[in-house]
Image (tube, rainbow, N blue to C red):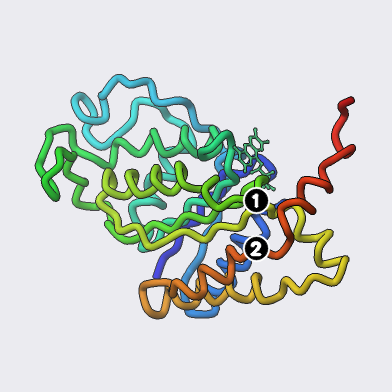
Amino acid sequence: MEVLIINGSPRKGRMHTGRIVSHFAEGMKEAGANVETIYSIALSIGDCKGCFNCWTKTPGKCIQDDDMTDVLSKMASADILVLATPVYVDGMTGSLKTLIDRFLPHLKGRFVIRDDHCRHPVREHVKQGKVVLVSVSGFTELDNFDPLINHVRAICKNMNREFAGALVRSVAWIMDGAAEQGVQLDSIYEAVRQAGRELVSTGSMREETLETIRRDFVPRDTVVQLTQGFYDEE
Ligand SMILES: Cc1cc2nc3c(=O)[nH]c(=O)nc-3n(C[C@H](O)[C@H](O)[C@H](O)COP(=O)(O)O)c2cc1C
């Protein structure tokens, strides 16, 4: 089973998105998947020019010759596509969105009706497997992920891929400090690996596993207090 992780964090693998998704990758590898990770910020990918040449003059091919050519071929052969991103202003990061916009060569231009909705047919060489969202946020409330989850669900319909679920971890930035204070967080990382194993071996992730990953471990007032005086203000 081929897994492509596209990590959209500008801090690549070093910080919280990277840490969570690396445990997820470990779990998927333990279950036998081939996992490749790419970082959208590290790639040279221009904005979509909106010219539609990939549907007209050069079907299936973008007029821009940049790193997206290689990414498109990796996406086409991925059984599972993992979109990993911190919440940035209630959505995904810019570099990840730029990359997603450039997937249009995988589609054909004409419209078809799929599930009672106008869509584009997906080209024959493109696998139509699953998509998983992995995300971390700065704020505490789980509703911070809602716009992003809805967006990724919609992207799945556009790509004709199955949305296989979201691994979300709020206030990820507090995890190291909390662990130093004795808060037991190993069960969260273990659940992330477990989710990876479940996805590859059974095709889905158990709700109980996802709930362990997103559970509250620090009261919101404590989080608010911790930010006081940390930043450069009055
Ligand atoms: C430009 C920017 C916008 C952000 N917007 C949000 C937001 O809307 N909601 C939220 O909960 N956190 C927000 N955050 C916090 C990040 O999600 C958080 O710091 C995350 O841990 C960063 O991921 P990383 O550690 O992989 O870099 C934002 C951070 C930045 C830099």
Viewer-proximal residue among 210 and 99? 210
125 left or right of 25 in image = left
Disc 2 packing (10 Å; few <14; some 14–19; many ≥20): some
71 left or right of 136 in image = left
Residue that badge 1 annotates:
140
Task: Name the kind of residue labelled 2 in the image.
Answer: Asp
Q: Position of residue 188 (x, y in %)?
A: 65, 71
Indicate which quadrant contains ligand 1.
top right
Q: Is residue 212 placed above or below 5 in the rendered structure?
A: below
State the SS at label 1: loop
Q: Are marks 2 and 1 in contact (CB under 8 Å)?
A: yes
201 left or right of 193 in image = left
Task: Name the kind of residue labelled 1 in the image.
Answer: Thr
Residue that badge 2 annotates:
216
Q: Position of residue 219 (x, y in %)?
A: 73, 58
Q: CA distance from mark 2 to mark 1?
A: 8 Å
Disc 1 packing (10 Å; few <14; some 14–19; many ≥20): some
